[in-house]
Image: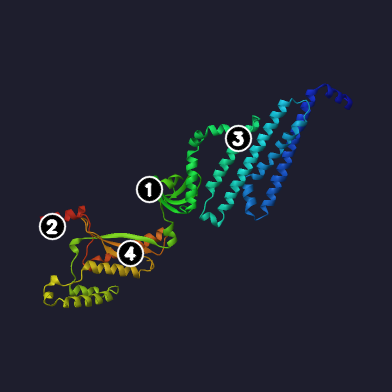
Amino acid sequence: MTWEAMMAWLESAPWARMVGALALLILSALLVQAVAQFLIVRVVRIVVQRTANRWDDALLEHRVFHRAARILPYLVIQFGIAWVPDLPPKAVLVISNVALATTLLYATLAIAGILDAAQTVYALSEHARTRSIKGYVQLGKLALYVVAAIAIVATIIDRSPWLLLSGLGAMSAVLLLVFKDTIMSFVASVQLTSNDMLRVGDWIEMPQVGADGDVVDIALHTVKVQNWDKTITTIPTWRLISESFRNWRGMQQSGGRRIKRTLCIDAGSVGFLDEAEIARLSKLHLLGSYLTDKQRLLADANAALGVAAVVPANTRRLTNLGTFREYALAYLRAHPNIHEGMTCMVRSLQPSATGIPVELYCFTNTTVWAEYERVQGDVFDHLLAILPEFGLRMYQNPAGADLVRWQGQRAA
């Protein structure tokens, strides 16, 4: 068939012209896509791998270039469909709108990828340790998807987006109900960030939800906490505002962790020290100067009593419990792992049915958990072991062996 004959046949067969033009348009779109994939994706990948910039790596990781490359073939269809001969106007409108809607879809995905890339780059910066923008990125993506969905639906049905927005205004109550958790989480995220209440890496404790560990992720709707047993607790963001939680960041930043623990002394072992006991305890280097000064003060006070000092009950005397408190305080102050710049004291609490509590209140000079427990254990091991030197006993409920020994003594 000659060229003239083929042209004549095409003139007499409109459907053939239309099919041919559509096929040519589709081939052009496929060719543009292939070229775009090669140039934008492969070439860009090679360039990105040769640079040290974080942004291009993040954009490539989140497939921003891939999604942008997919926009071009639909643009070809959108602007080329009008050149297809003998195609009904209604079909031209439908195909053009679908192509435009697909273009908007891939453009939205590309913008969302840019937001994800921004989050990735920010996470590598120093500011990410104190401020998390993941919640704002998620909120921005949510708003982007809502706007894109309205624009895509309006494009497909060939209506103005403002018409759909006016319809959504009548559904505001329903939308508020649907997005209630999102709105509450956004407000909570803003308050957490603006008031610096929570950071990634903080150790928080929230017993009501079973959370006790490090914050590993702060998102719009949830906060993830890795507990000490390596389990993950997911907390709704709004609960961190509506309920209380403990943040141990202040302790970690201060450089000291508190020791607050009691020794329950058997009240029956408390008494006055005699001269022999004072002489023996004076050999302890932590008590030597204290006992010397204390004896001088007590001697002066008792001398002022005159003849009343003949009755021992009228005089002031050293007790084993008070001397033990002073020894424990001196021991803490001399300990190399106790923080010198923070509160350090030893005090007696109100006696109870379980004895007389002697509380140690001090701070270690480390916040590392294992080291803290080691120091605390060493301190109490020593104080427990040295109690008999002062004639004191720890209070302890009778065990089975104690009852058996007591019954044996009664039988004998």
- Label 2 amino acid? Gln
In primary-sequence order, the first of circles 3 and 4 is 3
Of residue 394 and residue 298, the one placed in the foreground of this image is 298
- Please, which residue is most extreme toward the top here? 12
Residue marked by disc 4: 379
In primary-sequence order, the first of circles 1 and 2 is 1
Q: Is residue 302 left or right of residue 107?
A: left
- Label 3 amino acid? Ile
Residue marked by disc 2: 409
Between disc 3 and disc 4, the foreground one is 3
Label 4 SS = helix
- Label 1 amino acid? Pro
Residue marked by disc 1: 207
Residue marked by disc 3: 150
Between disc 2 and disc 3, the foreground one is 3
Label 1 SS = helix
Quarter of the figure with the C terminus: bottom left
